[in-house]
């Protein structure tokens, strides 16, 4: 066992540079067992880089990491995790299409049975145990996308306890938690501490740091300022160390701002009455905001605050009346809100606020473009002027108006979003968590500007889950609870404790989550609906055809469907790993041509046939792997690469054939797929084998599940050390191999090789996958679904022939089937908006 | 596969070399264009012939100019080739079987194109992935094109109609190309609409939250694409005196290739219409040049042209990717 005097984790002189930036310039840190060590610093100080190095997501340029006294170099985060270093990231990265249980197991590697397959029973059992720790009822088999952010974080903490973690890194763990959930978290931290674990705690919130921590380390500009015992320092000292200047110049609360006007009773600017969400996230909201007033909206996560804001801004359908300056406005979409004078700064800057790849200018003027156009033409000069003006007003730090906004720091990015709406000169400004993840300095500036704006007559709604923020900066605080307004307070006359108490839900979380579990159960059934519906269609159509059609042979149908099932799986395996391969048809031709070339050699058929099959499969696999290698090395989108190789492989085929179709293949080869003597269908047997093997791989092996994980969320996969570079050669290679199988089968069935073989098949292959329920964005789809999709496609084709529709109309059928499948899926999941 | 990881990681963190390097990288398409041009010019005896040879590529270009805008928004339209075939057949059937005048039939074809494009737009707005939605309509429209006239080509249009295939001695396709090019450059690079396109391609949700009318933009773009596809079909019928149900199979891939070689990001948010013209120039010059060469060099056959274009596509795309990373 480790000695209590020795640090459990020690980072010595860690350096890490990014192009042009020194993120860490030689930082040392010690974490003792049973200690809570707070790590603080402004954004860009190097905290995240240090965490990533500790948890194995990033390798340091130099410096050493010691864990339990031994030097370590993590190859990937899973290695660190299995040794007992658990990291809970600020916004837990999840695989939304995988089950909660699988998500939890994925982080430490899925447990295997003796046979080498994934032990799903153990995965689910462990997950249920973890969930019990939190004391909430969550169905661990539902897809993780259903979990709230709070639940995600709590589950990760609970998992750390169960796993008996030695080091727990918590990155802003309370940013999405309610006060009650935060209390639960603090209890768990005490528990971990008592168990001898070392906890590295990163937070922007001073009160938490001083409540929890034993020692504090301050980072600034990639360097350690100091590490001190908590008792030895005060909050002012810490802030000074973080920002590098005296604390008195930072922060602009009401108390420190002498010119802060007492809220004047201005005319009512925004009046909302009887506002109700279509799916009940908020109900009967009545709210008035006066000119020059800042109204804070406080509530727990899930209380309906953000939904309410989006309803007012026209981003989600809601009923009720909105008046601006007394005039009723009908707002069904953001443009109408904008015209009415409402602006909305969304809660998630990166995914909802900014177009990160576009310049500062484009982001700043995006909502007010009409004002900067001359006649019909947009004017870049006028847009730049507007950008400079508003950026100057908000003191945004940037190099040029044409600089991509992603190069700015978090605080400056948030100012750009704010600036966009200032340009619109709104009458009503709604801000949703405007200071989340923003450093102390920028936070204060944003608050100062809100006060200034209010002074100009704007009505401001400030939504926050940080109670001090609304208490300090709002003139009036409205508390949301379970979609309703639970109370209204004057923050100067009410204590924070009372406000917080009102926000707590009346319904116990137990009941709530039971209700959630019920609805999740019905949704889980909805997921398998896809396959059930397909199965019913296939069975019904098949039965009808068998009964009603003379000479209809199920075996013939299966023979044809087997080819399409294999091709569909080829497309699916690539798509599930978030790739796409449109060269499948050419790969089919390439492998058929390779096999045909071998078969034409002057040797006996017994020798040639196995070699030919091998050659066909190899050619397909090689082509598939080459696609992925080109995409990875060139940094290209797979559509672009396979668009190129589609023509290259086709060109190779034509060259191999020398412009003439190849006939006269050995008859023994033809008997492989269909043997007329015995009636044995080799193609069906091969398809069954292929389907079984692919199913085993995709559903029951670690690497198969990793493909799903990668497709579900490449970012989250990256944190586990799963990269496209590792998995794409496998998925594209499998796609190529299956195309090769299809090519050899087709050659055997058709008994001749011509240059156009397989042309356009890539689209049918993708169609089969999509009809079978494979999500084109990755991570979603099953082998069974694809097989059913192939069967359905063939059946519909046969049915059309039965009805006397010509064979030429396959395109029409394929097209309508894909559309029908997509629209059904869409209707089932509910319309996007 | 660790070597791959290392290599690709190296590509991502390559030190930035500043503007001069970017310029060198940006030059590549021009150099290729010059080489390809040289190839063509060295082969041509009769320049008038050259204009005729170029018409199929000009048609691809017309479609590529509109496709650039669609790809900029993060979308794609695989059904262009099928829309050209379908609208061509609609025109022919309206004229031949329904007894419409040829001008009215052409108008009907344009309307059909706008409708076909509108359906694409509707599907995308409804929330389907553009790739899959237009994959479906690609098959659907092709099927319809074959069905409306039972799979036969229709010929024998009036001479007055065929005469419109040339304007001032130049195939009308060139005039249409000029018109569409200017229109799309203004729309994409000098209008509010274009700014919206870029924002949507970079981050669709953020664009929506910034009050960009994303549905309107998508609806308009896909409809324009259908309309332009129909114009290409009408001009094609003038030129060939025929509407062919299996025309323009695979055109969508050539169109996308032009856009990609021009340097427009396939995922949207970055690119330009004029650069797609450059992409068209590079690919078409190479193709036409090799066509001319192949009459003299026996070993230079159709397949080597295919392979050369495929390799070119990948090379230029890699080059564009690198040069954009440098900046």
Image (tube, coloured by chain):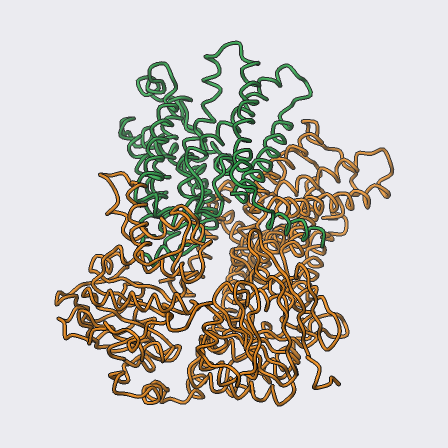
Extreme-front residue of the structure: A246
Q: Quadrant of residue A730?
A: bottom right
- Residue visible at 56% across and 39% down in the picture: B317
Q: Position of residue A148 (x, y in %)?
A: 46, 75
Which residue of the protein is positioned furthest toward the top in this rendering?
A: B45
The quarter holding residue A229 reads: bottom right
Residue toward you, B2 or A419? A419
B276 or A26: nearer the viewer: A26
Left or right of residue A578: residue A668? right
The chain drawn green is chain what? B
- Residue B127 locus on image (x, y percent): 40, 56
Q: Quadrant of residue A759?
A: top right
Q: Is residue A74 left or right of residue A143?
A: right
Q: Colour of chain A?
A: orange
A117 vs A183, nearest the viewer: A183
Residue A254 x/y as whole percent: 28, 76
């Amino acid at each position: 066992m480790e000695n209590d005097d020795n640090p459990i984790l020690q980072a010595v002189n860690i350096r890490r540079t990014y192009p042009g930036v020194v993120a860490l310039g030689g930082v040392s840190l010690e974490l003792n067992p049973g200690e809570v060590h707070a790590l603080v610093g402004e954004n860009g100080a190097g905290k995240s880089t240090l965490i990533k190095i500790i948890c194995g997501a990033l390798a340091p340029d130099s410096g050493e990491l010691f864990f339990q006294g031994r030097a370590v170099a993590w190859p990937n985060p899973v290695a660190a995790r299995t040794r007992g270093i658990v990291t809970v990231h600020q916004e837990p990265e999840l695989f939304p299409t995988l089950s909660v249980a699988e998500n939890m197991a994925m982080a430490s590697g899925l447990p295997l049975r003796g046979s080498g397959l994934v032990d799903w029973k153990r995965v689910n059992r462990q997950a249920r145990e973890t969930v019990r720790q939190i004391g909430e009822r969550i169905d661990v088999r539902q897809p993780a996308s259903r979990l709230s952010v709070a639940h995600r974080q709590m589950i990760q903490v609970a998992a750390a306890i169960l796993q008996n973690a030695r080091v727990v890194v918590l990155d802003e763990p309370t940013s999405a938690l309610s006060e009650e959930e935060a209390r639960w978290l603090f209890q768990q931290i005490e528990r971990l501490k008592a168990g001898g674990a070392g906890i590295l705690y990163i937070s922007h919130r001073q009160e938490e740091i001083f409540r929890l921590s034993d020692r504090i380390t301050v980072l600034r500009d990639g360097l350690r300022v100091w590490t001190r015992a908590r008792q030895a320092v005060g909050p002012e000292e810490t802030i000074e160390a973080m920002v590098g200047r005296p604390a008195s110049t930072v922060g602009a609360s009401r108390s420190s701002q002498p010119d802060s006007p007492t809220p004047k009773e201005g005319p009512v600017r925004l009046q909302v009455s009887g506002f109700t969400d279509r799916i009940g996230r908020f109900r009967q909201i009545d709210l008035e905001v006066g000119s020059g007033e800042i109204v804070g909206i406080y509530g727990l996560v899930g209380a309906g605050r953000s939904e309410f804001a989006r309803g007012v801004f026209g981003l989600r359908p809601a009923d009720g009346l909105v008046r601006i300056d007394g005039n009723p406005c009908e707002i069904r979409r953001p443009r109408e809100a904008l015209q009415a004078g409402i602006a909305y700064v969304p809660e998630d800057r990166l995914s909802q606020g900014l177009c990160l790849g576009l310049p500062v200018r484009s982001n700043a003027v995006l909502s007010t473009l009409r004002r900067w156009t001359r006649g019909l033409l947009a004017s870049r000069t006028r847009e730049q002027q507007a950008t400079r003006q508003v950026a100057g007003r908000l003191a945004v730090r940037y190099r040029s108006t044409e600089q991509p906004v992603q190069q700015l720091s978090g605080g400056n990015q948030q100012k750009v979003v704010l600036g966009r709406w200032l340009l619109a000169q709104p009458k009503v400004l709604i801000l949703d968590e405007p200071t989340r993840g923003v450093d102390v300095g920028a936070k204060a500036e944003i608050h100062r500007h809100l006060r200034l704006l209010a002074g100009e007559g704007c009505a401001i709604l400030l939504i926050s889950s940080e109670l001090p923020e609304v208490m300090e900066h709002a003139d009036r605080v409205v508390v949301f609870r379970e979609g309703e307004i639970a109370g209204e307070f004057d923050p100067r006359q009410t204590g924070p404790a009372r406000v917080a108490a009102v926000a707590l839900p009346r319904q116990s979380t137990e009941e709530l989550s039971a209700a959630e579990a019920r609805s999740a159960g019905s949704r889980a059934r909805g997921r398998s609906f896809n396959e059930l519906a397909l199965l019913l269609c296939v069975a019904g159509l098949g039965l009808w055809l068998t009964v009603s059609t003379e000479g209809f042979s199920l075996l013939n149908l299966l023979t044809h469907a087997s080819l399409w099932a294999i091709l569909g799986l080829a497309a699916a395996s690539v798509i599930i790993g978030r790739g796409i391969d449109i060269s499948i048809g050419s790969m089919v031709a390439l492998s058929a041509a390779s096999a045909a070339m071998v078969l034409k050699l002057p040797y006996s058929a017994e020798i040639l046939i196995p070699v030919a099959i091998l050659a066909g499969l190899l050619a397909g696999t090689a082509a598939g792997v080459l696609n992925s290698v080109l995409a990875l090395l060139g940094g290209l989108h797979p559509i672009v690469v396979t668009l190129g190789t589609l023509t290259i492989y086709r060109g190779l085929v034509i060259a191999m054939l020398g412009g003439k179709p190849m006939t006269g293949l050995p008859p023994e080869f033809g008997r492989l797929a269909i043997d007329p003597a015995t009636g044995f269908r080799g193609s069906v047997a091969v398809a069954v084998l292929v389907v079984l093997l692919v199913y085993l791989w995709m559903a029951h092996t670690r690497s198969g599940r990793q493909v799903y994980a990668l497709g579900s969320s490449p970012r989250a996969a990256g944190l586990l050390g799963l990269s496209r570079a590792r998995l794409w050669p496998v998925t594209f290679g499998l796609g190529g191999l299956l195309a090769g199988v299809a090519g050899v089968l087709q050659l055997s069935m058709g008994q001749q090789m011509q240059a156009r073989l397989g042309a356009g098949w890539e689209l049918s292959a993708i169609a089969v996958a999509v009809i079978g329920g494979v999500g084109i964005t990755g991570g979603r789809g099953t082998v069974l679904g694809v097989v059913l999709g192939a069967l359905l496609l063939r059946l519909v084709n046969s049915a059309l022939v039965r009805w006397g529709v010509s064979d030429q109309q396959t395109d029409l059928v394929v097209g309508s089937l894909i559309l029908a499948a997509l629209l059904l899926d869409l209707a089932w999941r509910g319309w996007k908006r | 596969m660790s070597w791959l990881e290392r290599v690709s990681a190296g590509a991502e963190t390559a030190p930035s070399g500043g503007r001069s390097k970017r310029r060198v990288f940006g030059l590549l398409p021009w150099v290729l264009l010059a080489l390809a041009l040289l190839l063509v010019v060295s082969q041509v005896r009769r320049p008038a012939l050259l204009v005729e040879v170029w018409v199929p590529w000009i048609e691809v270009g017309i479609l590529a100019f509109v496709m650039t805008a669609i790809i900029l928004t993060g979308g794609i339209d695989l059904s262009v080739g099928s829309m050209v075939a379908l609208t061509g057949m609609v025109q022919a059937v309206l004229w031949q079987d329904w007894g419409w005048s040829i001008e009215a039939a052409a108008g009907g074809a344009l309307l059909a194109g706008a409708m076909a494009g509108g359906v694409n737009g509707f599907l995308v707005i409804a929330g389907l992935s553009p790739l899959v939605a237009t994959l479906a309509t690609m098959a659907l429209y092709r099927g319809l094109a074959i069905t409306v006239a039972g799979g036969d080509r229709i010929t024998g249009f009036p001479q007055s109609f065929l005469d419109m295939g040339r304007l001032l001695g130049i195939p009308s396709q060139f005039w249409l190309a000029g018109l569409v090019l200017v229109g799309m450059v203004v729309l994409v690079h000098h209008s509010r609409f274009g700014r919206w396109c870029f924002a949507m391609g970079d981050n669709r949700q953020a664009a929506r939250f910034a009050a960009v009318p994303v549905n309107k933009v998508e609806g308009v773009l896909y409809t324009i694409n259908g309309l332009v596809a129909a114009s290409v079909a009408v001009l094609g019928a003038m030129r060939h005196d025929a509407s062919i149900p299996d025309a323009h199979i695979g055109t969508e891939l050539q169109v996308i290739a032009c856009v990609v070689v021009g340097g427009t990001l396939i995922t949207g948010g970055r690119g330009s219409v004029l650069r797609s013209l450059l992409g068209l120039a590079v690919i078409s010059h190479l193709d036409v040049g090799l066509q001319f060469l192949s009459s003299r060099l026996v070993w230079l056959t159709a397949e080597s042209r295919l392979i050369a274009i495929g390799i070119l596509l990948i090379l230029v795309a890699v080059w564009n990717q690198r040069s954009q990373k440098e900046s």
